[in-house]
Image (cartoon, rainbow, N blue to C red):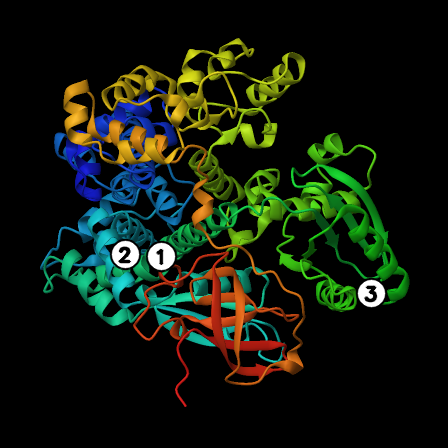
Amino acid sequence: MIDIGRQIAVELGIPNKSVLSAIALLDAGNTVPFIARYRKEMTGELDEVKIRDIEELLKHYRTLEQRKADVLRLIDEQGKLTEELRGQIERAAKMVEVEDLYQPYRLKRKTRASVARERGLEPLAQYLLSWPVSGNVNQEAERYLTEAVASVEDALRGALDIIAELISDEAEIRSWLRDHTRSRGLLCAKARDAGRDSVYRMYYDYSEPVGKVPPHRILAINRGEREEYLNVSVEVDQGPIIAQMNSRIIKDGQSITAELVHTAVQDAYKRLLAPSIERDIRNELTARAEQQAIIIFSKNLRSLLLQQPVRGRMILGVDPAYRTGCKWAVIDDTGKMLEVGVVYPTPPQNKTGESEQVFAGLISKYGIDCIVIGNGTASRETEQFVADLIRKLGLPGLSYVIVSEAGASVYSASKLAAREFPDLDVAKRSAISISRRLIDPLAELVKIEPRAIGVGQYQHDIAPKVLDQSLAQVVESAVNHVGVDLNTASPSLLKYVSGINLPVAENIVQFREQNGRFKKRGELLKVPRLGAKAYEQCAGFMRINDGDDPLDATPIHTESYGLTYRLLELARLDVGGMGTPEFRSRLQALDVEQAAGELAAGVPTIRDIVEALLRPGRDPREDLPLPIFRRDVLSLEDLQPGMQVEGVVRNVVDFGVFVDIGVKHDGFVHISQLSERRVRHPMDVVSIGDVVTASVISIDPERQRIALTLKPIRH
């Protein structure tokens, strides 16, 4: 069997010792964020990405080994397991190799070959494969005539069916044919009805080498096929394939049975192998495309979750709409809802004056300094109304910002929203969600099913279970990267903390409500169902500000408190001085490696402790760009080719980037326009939330499309 640890080490280019340590830690029930942050000495400082890769490959290879064991057992039960076959199965490195080896022994439904065997024609098939150089094939076939086999033609047809199935079950032939089709095949699409217009028109007469089809194109073609606009196939020149199969199967070209077996070879390919290999290739392409889509969605989601929070503002949030009006909510700088309502500045009501009076009153009453507008239906009309109001009021500190409202309706209709705001209708809840996305995007977005946030490509074409699992890992990673305030975090946020699930998260909040603020991390052990293992996993990611121990406000784990105080003693510092210039200066002068030696501790742990002490209470999101605050609005008519515009990256896909530049429709930067140097993928250049300066290439008012470039325009 495969040495899984060594195989993973080779595939990922990671030292075997680090891989084995990571596997042992995962098997012991430790989470990926905990291992990456607090077990660096054991893993050789593997980061989260590498540990997740190990976790995925470990699962894959264990599934492979289990399948091998099942196949060996099933073949052995048939009494057909030879030592040679056992060795081939045990050495197989891929699931498809195991399935190819199992193919001849798989219990099949009724086939033409199985019917022929029932009629006693297997000896005739064996005769044809014995390659006789003399004799009479028809006379030999006559020996097998029965009531069920009425003629020589029937007998030979049945024997050839058996041979065709034997050929199609040959593992080496299937493997070669799969490789050949991958390298020489074309993915083709044709219109089912060329006169029927659709978004798939570009694929109405399309072909591209199988190995070169980009993932987003595969998913688009699959969807076109599913929606019955396209017929899709994998096509390959049959001549070389039949010739290669003949050379492998026909042992003697001079035999009197060679021509008949050649017929079986053609039948085996066209009837049995070609459809099966096409399914395999299509499945491989789809799996690869789905994996890429998940990667894109995951990276976009992480960027969205880790956008910089905007602190210290009084906010008026607006959920735009036409007929039902714009729902609004006032929230303070902690996210507390103060007042909600609705105005009708958009068509068909167009009650602009009345809406201005309401908003002006709210701005004056609450000292509003930022209006947050969701980017959905009627967003631009609402934006124009808000920009006009800001201009009329002339308040220097007042601005507005557009935020993505993806998933807001999902949240507002959820049980969670109903518990948070039982007295509000669904629409007004969404206005609160939109407002809070500016104050703390992470805390608000974790309340929404990740795939409902919609920042990716073709996410609706991916199996929900696979997508949900991957996205949950992204949210878990983001939450633990930032850490949570134990005294304010909601169950929605707490459930993503390392070692915590939703029931325990709800118990934490209930404990907090019954007993008051947590004063120290150790009190978590009093929470029902939160045991020692869960505490070990979560403690370092929980923050307590103004608690009994200043270290509780840092990412230093409680297991390292003793080491931390010894380190401070070594540096002649007091924990109470954290944050002061003298404290930072003396800590920065510390020789980390020397301190680790004196304290008999690992260098990575000491380095992390020093970093945490230097920047207590630091939010890693502070290093990211703030959203763009605007005071005026652009329209499509304002744009001219060559004009420079500032915008926020809203989505990144394989083929380019969508940028909100403040007009009704996002501009698009094709991958070729991202940089003067060659870009392998847009994510190498930008991420969601990035503020970019772009130049307008062209405007298509009819199709509402804006082409942008991030390259300098040379006149």
Gap between marks 1 and 2 measured at Cα: 7 Å
Gap between marks 3 and 1 measured at Cα: 51 Å
Amino acid beneath label 3: Thr
Label 1: which secondary element: helix
Q: Residue at x 56, y 17 (%)?
A: 518
Q: Pointers 1 and 2 in contact (CB under 8 A)?
A: yes
Residue 523 position, x and y percent, is 51, 12
Q: Residue at x 70, y 41 (%)?
A: 332
Q: Quadrant of the N terminus?
A: top left
- Mark 1 or mark 2, earlier in chain: 2
Q: 654 or 99: nearer the eye?
A: 654
Q: Pointers 3 and 1 in contact (CB under 8 A)?
A: no
Residue picked out by circle 1: 281
> Residue 47 lies in what quarter of the image?
top left
> Residue 446 lies in what quarter of the image?
top right
Residue picked out by circle 2: 178
Nearer the observer: mark 2 or 3; the answer is 3
Q: 546 or 434: nearer the eye?
A: 546
Q: Around disc 3, counting alpha carbons within 10 Å, would you say few (fewer than 14), some (14 to 19), or many (20 or more)?
A: many
